[in-house]
Image: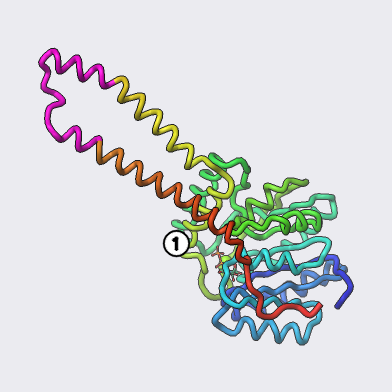
Amino acid sequence: MSEKPVFSVVVPMFNEEESLPVLYQRILEVMKQTGESWEFVMVDDGSSDGTANLIQEFAGRDERVRPVIFARNFGQQSAVKAGLDFARGDAVVVIDADLQDPPEVILQLIEKWRQGYEVVYAQRTAREGETFFKKLTAGVFYRLINRITDINLPLDTGFFRLLDRRVVDEINKLTEHHRFFRGLSIWVGYKQVAVPYKREARYAGETKYPLRKMIKLAMTAITGFSFFPLQVATYLGFISSGISILVIPVVIIMRLMGNQAFLGQASTLIAVLFLGGVQLIFLGILGEYIGRIYDEVRNRPLYIVRDKPED
Ligand code: UDP
Ligand code: MG
């Protein structure tokens, strides 16, 4: 298919062979209702199950399917970047493979796009089948990000959204390695609107986001959009210097008057350990930023593709 389609549907997949056939059917039915041409960009993010083969099978049967097969697992952020790179539509819909985002909502996203909105993000009003812990950490995450970064991240949004071609082109120009797609698509601006939806339980398989990956993503989001953690060191530095300046003359006067309150090693030890700990923490935070700078400087590709669409 060489004609440019009106819509692209981009789906990152990591071990989703069980969901893929059902996803394909449901997307097919939904996109039929739009009455427009469309393509299906299926990105295999280095799955170890049969996802890649299945994608190739679909591509063989249906010329709307554009297969992008990664050489290894590069993560959902990179998979979506690849999807956007290969998508050709005037509007691009990004959706998860596990059917937690009901494909039927795409029609509502498209309706908003037709009204002239350029970033239409789906916003969860309910989350089915997710643990209390996941909901709690997600809640803390959004509030923290909005507090300390320059972007105003809408609550309870995921990857699921529609982007106008102009927005996609702008996002594709951003080559940063530690990507936070949700943040980037807000950061670019344009006319944005939310569409509320109910997030379902996973169709099959398990979440690919254990706590470790969630913490990593939160760090990427924070360091990608804020210097706040670095500034905290400065604030704390001023506060502790301020306290010492006030306390030093007090202690001297007390000692001259014969007071024994600050004799002994305990108070010295506490002060040294406390400041040592604080310094180590901020060394670590500095390291987080420096490591990210290092990744940017090395400028390795965000993903490596084993197989890609022919045109
Ligand atoms: N995914 C991916 N690469 C990864 C992890 C996940 O492409 O390294 C895909 C996954 O196949 C799914 C989507 O990203 O289509 C969302 O993942 P998941 O459902 O595990 O996340 P959750 O919904 O639990 O936040
Ligand atoms: Mg999911």
The chief SS type of the magenta part is: helix
Count neighbours of disc 1 (C-alpha within 10 A) and say few if under 14, some if 14 to 19, many if 20 or more.
few
Q: Is residue 105 left or right of residue 181?
A: right
Q: Percent x, y for residue 200?
A: 59, 64
Q: Amino acid at mark 1?
A: Arg
Query: Which segment did they paint magenta?
Result: 247-271
Image quarter for residue 97?
Answer: bottom right
Q: Which residue is mark 1?
A: 212
Question: Residue 147 falls in which quadrant of the image?
Answer: top right
Please tell me whether mark 1 sits on a helix, a strand or a loop: helix
Q: Quadrant of the N terminus?
A: bottom right
Q: Is residue 60 magenta?
A: no
**Identity of the residue furthest to the top in this view:** 257
Q: How is the image coloured?
A: rainbow
Q: Nearer the viewer, residue 107 or 294?
A: 294
Q: Residue at x 47, y 56 (%)?
A: 215
Q: Is residue 261 magenta?
A: yes
Where residue 116 appears, as percent x and y from the top left, is: 84, 50
In the shown orientation, is residue 15 left or right of residue 280? right
Q: Dividing the picture into quarters, in which one does residue 39 lie?
A: bottom right
Q: Nearer the viewer, residue 11 or 231?
A: 231
- Residue situated furthest front in the rendering: 298
Q: Position of residue 20 (x, y in %)?
A: 65, 78
Is the residue 16 above or below the residue 134 in the image? below
Q: Residue at x 51, y 44 (%)?
A: 144
- For the point 12% across and 31% down, which residue is it? 264
* Extreme residue in the right direction: 3
Q: Quadrant of ligand 1?
A: bottom right
Q: Residue at x 60, y 55 (%)?
A: 180
Report x, y in % for residue 258: 10, 15
Judge by depth and name the residue closer to the eye, 98 or 288. 288
106 is higher (above) or lower (below) than 221: below
